[in-house]
Image (spheres, coloured by chain):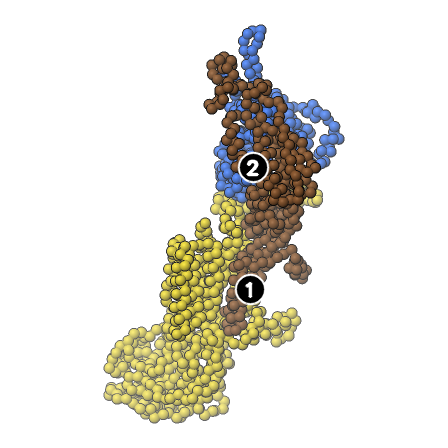
Chain colours: A brown, B blue, C yellow
Amino acid sequence: MLRAAVATLRRWMNPDRVLRVTPMGRVYLVLTLGVGVGALNTGNNLLYLVLAFLLSSIIVSGVLSERVVRDLTVRRLLPDGAFAHEPFPIRYELRRRRGHAFAVAVREASTLMNAGAFAAVVSAAGPTVVRATALAPRRGPWALAAVEVSTTFPFGIFEKKRTIALADTLLVYPRRGFACEVSTAGQRQVPGDASSGAARGGTADVADLRELVPGEDARRVHWRRSAALGKPVVVVREREERRQHVLRVDPTTPSEALDSACEAAAGQARRLLADGWSVGLEVGGARLRPGSGALHERRLLAALALAGYGDAG
Amino acid sequence: MNATDLLKTTHARLGEVVLGKPLQAKLALTCLAARGHLLLEDVPGVGKTTLAEGLARAFSLSCARVQFTADLLPSDILGAQVFLQQQGTFEFRPGPIFHQVVLADELNRAPPRTQSALLEAMAQGQVSLDGVTRPLPTPFVVIATQNPLDLAGTYPLPDSQLDRFLMRLSLGHLAPQFEAELLVSRRSEPLQAFSPVGGPDVLSSLQRAADAVRVDRDVADYAVRLATATRAHGDVERGVSTRAVLALMAAARAWALWEARDFVTPGDVRAVLTATVAHRLLLKSAVQGAFSRDEAAHLVEEISRRVDAPR
Amino acid sequence: MSRPLETLARDVTASIAFGAVAVSGSVPGPVLLAFPVALGLSLRGVRPLAGRRSASVVLLLAVAAALFGWATFGRLELIVAAVAFAVLVNCHRLVAEPSPQTTRQVLLTSLLVITGGAVLVGDVRFALFVFGFIVAASWTMARMVLDGPEGRREPGIDEAPARRQVAYGLGLTLALGVVLFVVFPRLSWNQAMARAPPGLGGVTGMSESVRLGGGGDIKTNPRVVFRVSLDPDPLTESLEAYWVGRHFTRFDGRQWSSTGTAQPPTRRVLMPFPRRRGARSVKQDIVLSSAYGSRTLVALDVPMHFLNGRSVGLGGAVPMNLSRVPDDQVLAMLEGNEIGYEAISVDEPSFDTSAPPASATELPALDPRVRALAVELKGPAKAPLDVATRFERELTRRYAYTLALPGEVDDPLVDFLFVRRAGHCEDFATALAVLLRIEGIPSRVTTGFLGGQRAGARYHVRAGDAHAWTEAYVDGAWRRFDATPEAGRSASPPAWLSAAIVAYETVEEWWRLRVLDYSVRDQFAFVRDVLRWPSGTDEAGEARGASLTPTGRGALVVSLATVALLALLFLPRRRGRGTHPASGLLDAIEATLRARGVDTGGKPLEEFSQSLTATNHPLGPALAHVTRRYLEARFGARPLGPREQRALLATLETPPGPSAG
């Protein structure tokens, strides 16, 4: 009993708990004070009774909210990467060793814009995964140091907050420009697998024959095969070599100008890759050899995200 | 040998070649018993191919492996009419699809037209070429692998085609102690030592046993409620289809065989839920692709916790 | 977003708060009407004020101005005006657009209202309201908290543990509140509060004059008009005692009146009777309730001494002067919600030896039949005491008691004696007094109460106990003669009703003693008991403990009952779907596991059983078997008999062999 009391006291002293009064709680406290003054002034026992219940609600709030935040472990489930200015999900896995926690709100302690996640019930039966939608204002590596776990349970008068140290780094890629993509998509008229790098006509090896699609250039018709089959067919050729392009970004100190340069480079890389180019990147001294594919695109984006932040590349 | 013993023997033998993945091997066998096709999604080099070949050998199934590439044509899979100079006639030379197990490696590297040739054959169990319909052998299983990180190697599978796979599994990296074991055993070709459990008829009998498993109304209702919950969830753009519910029940039936039961329990449904349902969800989240896999699995687990099982 | 549950909980909370002030009876009528209207609209989902912010604010301001204007002109007490305004604000919020913000406002305003109720209502009913309010308000707030910041209630979450926790918190709040109430230091001796609200008009048996005739019925009103503790305590259940209010000596044939003018007010009033040794005196501590409705003080038998008058009202308890009027009535000099005083009486009826005034023998013009009747009734008796006794007996014997009043008649006395031959106590008292005066014996009519029923440590006297009797100056002292037949002396309600009233009043008495009148003195006593308790051997402590323990036990019982009630309210209902016969087995298995201290961690049984098997838990094999059988029975169409079920459960209960881990 005594030991529990001492432990409680120590927990109260513990600096990782912050008790904040909610707006409703503020009015509640003022009313409690008023009722208290009234009770003391008049000696009306019924005011004392009301006061006693108001005070006991406050105490019970403290005890129950402590129960909620005391035994909570949080694991952050970050996406592999996120784009600046684009909302992305951060999941938190909440666990309890025993009992339940209620009305748990989780949010990042850092400056990452974060609406916060909320779980009505967390039980010891299994982890509860909640999702917050976050938004990074800038590209770059974001160090996430801690999460804040808070609850207003049970009565919404106080918000008890506990900060749990949880270090992670989130790589935020440069902002994507959507408008550019739309326009190139409009230009690509050839259906099927043309975007893979199989070029239109030309001198490469024959890869396949297929029927003419309405709206296609009539010069691509293979007239001899068409005559044999009785319907117009075109030749699909595969290009053997790929064109290469190396993008260069000069990293200075991270600044708005560098950010927009990185955004432009990322956008260009994306377009080039989509058109079947091999894209390389030079950021300061570091160099990324030309390549293609989505994994390579990620690598490019990561390098651009880190440009100027010291350990680029 | 009854179905359960059969499954357990096969599982034990598979465990000798596919180290450290008992659950995945169990699910893969379940998938086979449920007449389903299997999609393995993982980074290269974690034993996808070994698992697939092991499954084929376990039941002495004829096996063909197709490495999908960007220039793979439908005819490379289905087969083509070949002109025979001597006879002056055309002859149909069947492609690799006319095997009982087709291992489609890196399926997403091929252009959609080639993918769909395979997937249509999977769906219909037959191939129609030049006006001739040729039935595929039975049992017929497609085991496809995908490389998730290399974002679809430019051709992610369309959702409708993902739907044709009964299960999606990911093997994940081996735990360190198994990796060490792998090095110590130093078997260059582990599958050489693999002895089959039985012939194709054994697998067919397994499949018939799975078909015979009965489903209580409340369990069927539970599966439907789970499916409905995926449709109602706020993070899901499009929930699972009715075909998915059928697939879920088929997988759960096969799973019941492991416990030597002739009826399905809610636990069976939960056991196969993530593997059968997660890849059929289309999420709303802003970042699709590689992340959505984890997210979908989380979501499905969340849903299975929320929906009350029949008591 | 519609939140029907939250809105409903909010409305219930507001209604309870309103109920608390509504029962006080002091809230103006229009406000009393406005709230049910607003509540009805809110419950039907009609929100006329949604989106009309400025207009409604102007409306509220106008109402506030009107109320406080009323208050400044003294037509309304300020506190009542404030409470009324709070109620109106609540009405306003109820019919506004529902939102979390509105809900919070309603709850806070309701808190104000219930605080107002604490000032206006002193009844035990307030306890019900305040408990109800705390439960409803806490529930509403917890509901909002669980709905999260966006107010989106996620479907499918099992909230039963949350409900249990909230119920637990509520129980804790109530219990802790009671403790805080007991130990919170009372810094002032002063106690201001409304006691029982006057309700709908005062009822009393005390009037300025006794007038015979008139129409209507005499009510058998069970309302308590005063409470009294006696020292020494007679310890009887029913105290058939005469409580003297006033004497009337002047009779004009129709009504009795008194003539005296009040003497200057003093702090204490000593009746001018010569003192006599050996008479037993009884000290009374009397509290006239607000239902008493008169300023005449009453006391037992022959009052000797009135002192320590105080008026208890909204402003606190105020010491009060008393004034004596020659007709031997004592008046309180202040109005108040309740009037408290002490009186010392002598319980010998012949103690009053004051000489009769001239008016005690004056007779109005009488019908000759009355004189004839006097002669007839007197019979052979000669001595005044015999005559008086005989008159008393004959009247009692010959006339019937009725509660019906005669209506307007020319001569009520004649009407009683010769026409109706039935009447009520005043008729009997008047007739006896007149007959005595005809025989030359000075007499007077006394009004007061006859009765007193024990409730807790005090006696209650009700409005229905009002009575009138006759006193005759015989042998140098005033003696009491009561001609009213026994049946009509104290009108009592039916048995079941009186039982209910007694039960209610016992609770109410407890409430008054332990809550309303709880003071720093009680706190000292409490602290002393707590400090003494551990030793527990000295007799004083035992005695004190014995006197306090019932209270403590009562408090314990009340709080336990509250907790139990809450648990019942908030515990999850049994799943309605568990109709399958095998589901009972699952419940039993889970209960057995809990009883054995095995924590399933919320996992479904199938998965839990597998995990036990996987970890080589000693219970694993048994549980696997039982689980298997349950699954077969539930989903595999292999029904299970009750005997087999018991056998299965028994395998779980037998302790496992030596544990491996």
Res. B202 visible in picture: no
Mark 1 Cα shell of 10 Å, populated few (<14), some (14-19), many (≥20): many
The front one of B57 and B197 is B57
The secondary element bearing badge 2 is classed as: loop
Q: Position of residue A9 (x, y in %)?
A: 65, 61
Q: Which residue is mark 1?
A: A55
The front one of B285 and C242 is B285
Q: Which residue is mark 2?
A: B288
Vertical order, C178 against A100 (above or below): below
Instruction: Give the quadrant of residue C291.
Output: bottom left
Residue, x 38% and y 54% (percent of image)? C46
> What amino acid type should be assigned to the residue bearing mark 2?
Gln
The secondary element bearing badge 1 is classed as: helix
What's the chain of the residue with tag 2? B
> What amino acid type should be assigned to the residue bearing mark 1?
Leu
Vertical order, C71 against A301 (above or below): below
Residue, x 51% and y 50% (percent of image)? C150
Image quarter of the N terminus of chain B:
top right
Residue, x 55% and y 46% (percent of image)? C587
